[in-house]
Amino acid sequence: MLRHQREAAAPSVGTAAAQGAPFVGTGSSVRSAERCSRLTPRGTTSALWTGRGGGFGKRAEATAKSEVSVNRSFRVDTVKLQHRYQQLQRLVHPDFFSRRSQTEKDFSEKHSTLVNDAYKTLLAPLSRGLYLLKLHGIEIPEGTDSEMDREFLIEIMDINEKLAEAQSEAAMKEIESVVRAKQEELTDNVRRAFEQDDFEKAKEILTKMRYFSNVEEKIKLKKIPL
């Protein structure tokens, strides 16, 4: 059993090995990790996003650069992102540090968590968009109802009412389908806004996506049997 509990959204290193991905030996991983500088969440996300080392040391930078680098844009190749995630986890995953000192184990736990968090941030369109806005000095505070148009807020209220009243699986699926379609449309719109460097428009769209994301969470909770 693995010593480290992986995030559900992240592909496991073990799975990568089963698929034939090359593993870096334990000794090599330790030496590479020992050369790493102290990481921040932003540095870790940058390493995944751009394919540059972002503080992971010379070996990590070399492996990341073996992939085609991508710009910091909303459009992300998820296959390449997953590949970079697996590369970085081979350097810092706790499985490779089980016989090392406690300091090295703590290092591994911390940096493996940072890699997981960065991967999840970039994988989901909403969190990726919010992160990209933050890099441009724009954040969306909670409680922005006053800035949303009345028609949109009525639409959200209507969906929430239907969800509260839904008693059958068919009704739930219908609501879920509507929300999914709305998110796909908004994701496409925010991609275009970022491509045009229209960050205020992107902010508006991401705010709407966050409302629908809240509805998605309510749907998940309602599906859980009491």
Image: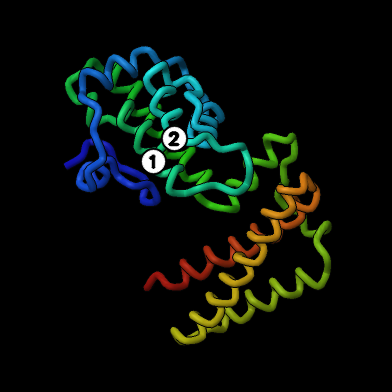
Quarter of the picture containing the N terminus is top left
| Amino acid type, label 1 | His
Is the residue 38 above or below the residue 136 in the image?
above
Whole-percent x and y of residue 211? 66, 62
* Quadrant housing residue 86: top left
Mark 2: which amino acid? Glu
* 125 left or right, relative to 32: right
Residue placed most toward the observer, 3 or 146: 3
- Disc 2 residue crowd, few under 14, some 14–19, many 20+, Cα 10 Å: some
Q: Residue at x 29, y 17 (%)?
A: 104
Secondary element at tag 2: loop
Number of callouts:
2
* In the displayed structure image, the side of residue 121 where residue 9 appears, left or right: left
The reply to whether the C-beta atoms of the residues labelled 2 and 1 are less than 8 Å apart is yes
Identify the residue at horizontal 35%, vertical 21% (top origin).
107
Q: Residue at x 48, y 20 (%)?
A: 55
**Precedes in sequence: disc 2 or disc 1:** 2
Q: CA distance from mark 2 to mark 1?
A: 9 Å
- Nearer the observer, 74 or 156: 74
Q: Which residue is mark 2?
A: 67
Q: Is residue 14 visible?
A: yes
Residue at (38% x, 47% y) in the render: 10
Which mark's residue is nearer the viewer, 2 or 1?
Answer: 2
| Residue 206 at least partly seen | no
Task: Tell me if 167 is positioned left or right of 87 in this view.
Answer: right
Q: Secondary structure at mark 1?
A: helix
Residue ID for mark 1:
83
Give coordinates of residue 192: x percent, y percent.
71, 55
Mark 1 Cα shell of 10 Å, populated few (<14), some (14-19), many (≥20): some
**Quadrant (top left/top right/bottom left/bottom right) for the C terminus:** bottom left
Indicate whether 8 appears above or below 43: below
